[in-house]
């Protein structure tokens, strides 16, 4: 009689999808918090008497720690267990949400938002690794990544609607307190459903010098970017911070080239698909973040939409995105590989941005807004899945957390830089038109059109890079069972 196979540490087949739902619920809570607060800022300012110059720190404190700790969070997951770090991140984020909701002073709210960003960075960095290790066959992995992609790309629009509803019906405190029941539910369900996968690294040595230097470099870079429009992009402070970030990052690279167990093995970037996918992600995020921000301003400041109407205007794009992310994108990856869907999706997004670049002062939703929205939703729904698969598909399980941290950092930094650059371009163009005698609405639209056109060029370049340089892998989500050597304790 043959010996029965040893039981796997992964949950039974049907429970993997329940585990995916729990992971995505945790990630959705993080994604929502990046946008849900924006709607509540006027109420927070009035209640806590924030000076105008300091109000931005309610957002910036979160973005600073979120961007700064993504890479370290992913690597800690590789060393000490993705499940353990996910639980730690959710607990930290939930407790910080409670502190935000109970804040009665400006300092308490800003500090709690920074802790929220830290917890969010850890969750975001390791959730993708858990999904990659749960789903190892090409078809299941592509479908699971589609669900994850939908949550990441559609959660921002939902956050704007939720923020407006909670602030209007209750108070700004509930923008944060709503996270408490969700966070507790995710923690309890994670303990039951997430598998205790074994740590695959041969050692648990943390490269402290590398961790400190890369985190400082990212913190300096994010701080320079999020304050660039306020301080001035050519100001001594902004240039000094960017220069310091570059110098510390150079020191980090020197450390990684010399230590025995580096935080980021530099050989990882010899994996062409990982590198190209991250460059593609930077360009795409730069275009998409700026589109979301500037199109919302166009709808409000030019067409006169209310915040609720702006949220509803994005609904068609989200529905299209959902339809493709939750199934059709996976089928395209299985049929054509990752290159064709990636290039096609990004070109559709570029076309949508080009349509926004011709949006007039007296625009109509059906004619001047909806077509671009639909193309951008279609493009994002098709392309997000292949980008993630390209970035993660060639990486062994023991480095999946690091790869996840890298791709999330690329998206975050690309989005922040793109928004800063294109918003500055729009403002400069509008200022030039105002100086030439144009009316306020004409000047605003002229600035937005210039920014949308450059965004379309970013998306086109991303399509060319992804479609032309990625290695053709019809089954990018290669089937393999992750090795397990030392069990998580």
Image (cartoon, rainbow, N blue to C red):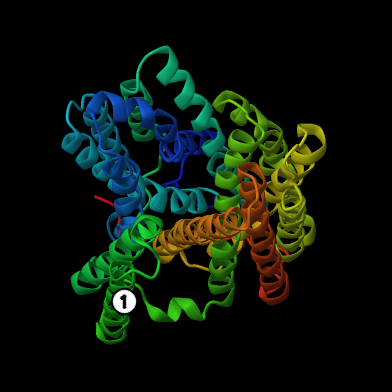
| Residue 121 image point, x, y percent | 35, 50
Q: As rendered, which of 438 and 441 lies closer to the eye?
A: 438
Whether residue 37 is situated above or below residue 253 in the rendered picture: above
Going by the picture, which residue comes out furthest to the right? 367
Residue 103: image quadrant is: top left
Residue in view at x 29 percent, y 71 percent = 236
**Position of residue 21 in the picture relative to residue 198 (left or right):** right
**Position of residue 91 in the picture relative to residue 269 (left or right):** left
| Residue 16 image point, x, y percent | 52, 39
Whether residue 106 is situated above or below residue 415 in the rendered picture: above
Residue in view at x 50 percent, y 81 percent = 270
Label 1 CA crowd tier, 10 Å (few <14, some 14–19, many 20+): some
Q: How many marks?
A: 1
Residue 305: image quadrant is: top right
Residue in view at x 52 percent, y 38 percent = 156
Does the rendering let one see residue 383? Answer: yes
Q: As rendered, which of 198 and 120 lies closer to the eye?
A: 120
**Position of residue 355 in the picture relative to residue 11 (left or right):** right
Going by the picture, which residue comes out furthest to the top? 169
SS of the residue at dot 1? helix
Provide the residue designation for mark 1: 243
Residue 345: image quadrant is: bottom right
| Residue 151 image point, x, y percent | 55, 39
Q: As rendered, which of 382 and 368 lies closer to the eye?
A: 368
Does the rendering let one see residue 393? Answer: no
| Residue 40 image point, x, y percent | 39, 28
Q: As rendered, which of 160 and 387 lies closer to the eye?
A: 160
């Amino acid at each position: 009689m043959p010996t029965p196979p040893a039981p796997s540490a992964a949950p039974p087949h049907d429970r993997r999808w329940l585990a995916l739902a729990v992971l995505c619920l945790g990630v959705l809570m993080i994604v929502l918090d990046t946008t849900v607060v924006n709607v509540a800022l006027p109420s927070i300012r009035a209640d806590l008497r924030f000076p105008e110059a300091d109000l931005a720190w309610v957002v910036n404190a979160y973005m600073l720690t979120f961007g700064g700790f993504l890479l370290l969070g992913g690597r800690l997951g590789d060393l000490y267990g993705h499940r353990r770090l996910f639980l730690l991140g959710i607990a930290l984020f939930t407790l910080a949400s409670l502190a935000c909701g109970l804040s009665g002073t400006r300092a308490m709210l800003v500090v709690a938002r920074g802790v929220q960003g830290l917890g969010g960075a850890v969750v975001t960095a390791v959730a993708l690794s858990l999904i990659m290790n749960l789903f190892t066959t090409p078809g299941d992995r592509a479908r699971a990544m589609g669900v994850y992609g939908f949550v990441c790309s559609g959660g921002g629009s939902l956050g704007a609607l939720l923020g407006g509803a909670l602030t209007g019906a209750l108070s700004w405190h509930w923008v944060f307190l709503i996270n408490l029941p969700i966070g507790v539910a995710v923690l309890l369900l994670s303990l039951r459903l997430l598998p205790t996968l074994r740590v695959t690294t041969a050692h648990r040595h943390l490269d402290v010098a590398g961790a400190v230097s890369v985190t400082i470099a990212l913190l300096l870079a994010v701080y320079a970017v999020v304050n660039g429009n306020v301080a001035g992009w050519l100001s001594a402070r902004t240039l000094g911070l960017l220069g310091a970030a570059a110098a510390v990052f150079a020191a980090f690279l020197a450390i990684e080239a010399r230590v025995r167990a580096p935080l980021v093995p530099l050989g990882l970037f010899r994996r062409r698909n990982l590198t190209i996918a991250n460059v593609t992600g930077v360009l795409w995020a730069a275009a998409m973040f700026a589109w979301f921000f500037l199109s919302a301003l166009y709808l409000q400041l030019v067409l006169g939409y209310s915040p609720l109407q702006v949220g509803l205007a994005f609904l068609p794009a989200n529905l299209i995105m959902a339809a493709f992310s939750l199934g059709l994108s996976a089928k395209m990856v299985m049929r054509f590989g990752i290159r064709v869907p990636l290039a096609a999706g990004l070109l559709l997004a570029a076309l949508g941005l080009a349509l926004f670049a011709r949006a007039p002062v007296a625009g109509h939703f059906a004619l001047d807004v909806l077509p671009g929205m639909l193309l951008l939703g279609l493009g994002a729904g098709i392309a997000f899945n292949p980008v993630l698969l390209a970035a993660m598909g060639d990486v062994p399980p023991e480095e999946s957390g690091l790869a996840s941290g890298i791709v999330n950092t690329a998206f975050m930094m690309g989005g922040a830089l793109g928004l800063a650059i294109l918003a500055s371009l729009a403002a400069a163009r509008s200022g030039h038109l105002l100086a030439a005698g144009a009316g306020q609405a004409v000047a605003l639209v002229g600035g937005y059109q210039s920014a949308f056109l450059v965004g379309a060029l970013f998306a086109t370049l991303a399509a060319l890079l992804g479609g032309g340089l990625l290695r053709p892998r019809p089954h990018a989500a290669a089937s393999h069972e992750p090795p397990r050597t030392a069990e998580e304790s």
